[in-house]
Amino acid sequence: MARRTKAEAAATREALLDAAEEVFLERGVARASLDQISRRAGLTRGALYWHFRNKGDLFRAMLNRVRMPFEELVAELDDPSLGDRPLDAVRLGCRAGMIHLDTPRHRRVHSILLHRCELSQDFDPLKVKDEFVQETLKAFLRHFCLAHEKGQLRDGLSPERATELFHFSLNGLFWEWLRDAEDFSISERGAILVDTLIDLMRKA
């Protein structure tokens, strides 16, 4: 019985997160209410509070369902030689991440992050978003610093500038993709962009 109760609780939590994705996408984070989310899930507000303290807690849990720490993406490649090839680690890690992105759930959540996050009275979703961005930027910078130390980064290109170039290029790609996801495949177009950027950064 306990096992069934645990499974039911997990199913309830997932239903609430699914509903949060839908309501946040439709109304924006600031205008979405917990009542609307619980009703969309077909549950009571009490059930929502059993799993989440507030809207901020729910928003963070929604992001964590699709969160892909860059270092974990690189680790999943299971290639020890990437430690000596940091530019290839960035290239392959980004390509793996874009394959994950090309799914309906990831598309919805990233659409919320880019287009539906407004300052809320309950919490600041942009602050939460920035935490995830900074995590990725630190990972990029670490790899580009290692490439610089190994003499693999082109002359005149600092690790900091390489990180900025990657960040703004990928951000623009995400923006265009989310504007009309049917226009192109981010995993295919993204692979070309990432490969081109790495080739431009690599020392000849």
Image (cartoon, rainbow, N blue to C red):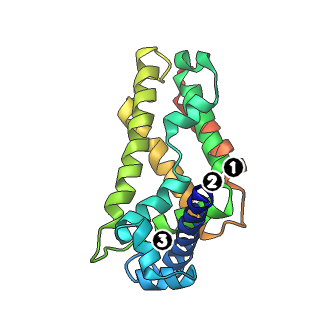
Name the residue beneath numbered marker 1. Answer: 187
Q: Is residue 51 visible?
A: yes
- Compared with residue 41, is residue 184 higher up or lower down, i.e. above or below? above
Name the residue beneath numbered marker 3. Answer: 115
160 or 14: nearer the eye?
14
Which residue is rendered at x = 56% and y = 83% of the image?
Answer: 40
Secondary structure under the numbered disc 1 in the rendered image: helix
Q: Measure the alpha-carbon separation of dots 3 and 2.
A: 16 Å
- Compared with residue 187, is residue 175 higher up or lower down, i.e. above or below? below
> Residue 74 location in percent, x, y?
57, 31
* In-image side of 102 versus 75 (left or right): right
Type of amino acid under label 1: Ser
Type of amino acid under label 3: His
Location of the C terminus by quadrant is top right
Query: For the residue carrying disc 3, how many other residues have a C-alpha within 10 Å: few (<14), some (14-19), or many (20+)?
Result: some
> Residue 203 location in percent, x, y?
53, 21
Secondary structure under the numbered disc 3 in the rendered image: helix
Q: Is residue 32 visible?
A: no
Which residue is rendered at x = 58% and y = 20% of the image?
Answer: 82
Of all residues, the one furthest to the left in this rendering is: 121
> Residue 149 location in percent, x, y?
40, 16
Which residue is rendered at x = 45% and y = 35% of the image?
Answer: 140
Observer-side mark, 3 or 2, equals 2
Secondary structure under the numbered disc 2 in the rendered image: helix
The reply to whether discs 2 and 1 touch (Cβ–Cβ < 8 Å) is: yes
Name the residue beneath numbered marker 2. Answer: 101
Which residue is rendered at x = 54% and y = 15% of the image?
Answer: 84
As drawn, the label of residue 32 is none
Q: Earlier in the sequence, mark 3 or mark 2?
A: 2
Q: Earlier in the sequence, mark 3 or mark 1?
A: 3
Query: For the residue carrying disc 1, how many other residues have a C-alpha within 10 Å: few (<14), some (14-19), or many (20+)?
Result: some
